[in-house]
């Protein structure tokens, strides 16, 4: 594998990781808006779980500020 192919592969892997983290954040936000508990986080991986919890916390703050009921 030449250097150019290695770079492309690394970029693709990073993009997939970012997408997974973005989805986890969005799902955490949706869970928080719907009133689910943070203990219901479906992820085990520390990085992904952290993203889910971040989204969940944002949703809880938005609910407390009256943005959602």
Image: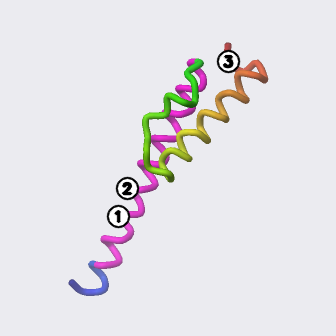
The magenta region covers 6-34
Foreground pick, 52 / 26? 52
Q: Quadrant of residue 68?
A: top right
Residue denoted by label 2: 16
For this orientation, the residue located farthest to the bottom is: 2
Q: Mark 1 touching mark 2, by CB under 8 A?
A: yes
**Badge 2, how many Cα within 10 Å: few under 14, some, many 20+?**
few
Q: Quadrant of residue 37?
A: top right
Q: Is residue 35 left or right of residue 66?
A: left
**For numbered disc 2, what is the local secondary structure?**
helix
**Badge 1, how many Cα within 10 Å: few under 14, some, many 20+?**
few
The verdict on residue 15 being magenta is yes
Q: Is residue 23 left or right of residue 59?
A: left
Q: Position of residue 18 (x, y in %)?
A: 46, 54
Query: How many labels were placed on the picture?
Result: 3
Foreground pick, 4 / 24? 24
Residue denoted by label 1: 12
Q: Position of residue 39 (x, y in %)?
A: 54, 30
Residue at x 55%, y 21% (from the top left corner): 36
Residue at x 50%, y 44% (from the top left corner): 49
**For numbered disc 1, what is the local secondary structure?**
helix
Mark 3 or mark 1, earlier in chain: 1
Q: Quadrant of the N terminus?
A: bottom left
Distance between mark 1 and mark 2 Cα atoms: 6 Å
Q: Mark 3 touching mark 1, by CB under 8 A?
A: no
Q: Is residue 69 above or below residue 24?
A: above
Q: Is residue 4 above or below residue 21?
A: below
Q: Is residue 67 above or below residue 1?
A: above
Residue denoted by label 3: 68
- Say the numbered circle drawn on residue 22: none
């Amino acid at each position: 594998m030449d250097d150019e192919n290695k770079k492309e592969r690394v970029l693709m892997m990073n993009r997939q990781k970012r997408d997974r983290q973005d989805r986890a954040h969005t799902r955490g936000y949706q869970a928080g808006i719907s009133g689910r508990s943070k203990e219901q986080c479906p992820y085990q991986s520390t990085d992904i779980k952290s993203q889910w919890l971040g989204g969940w916390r944002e949703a809880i703050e938005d609910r407390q500020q009256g943005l959602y009921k």
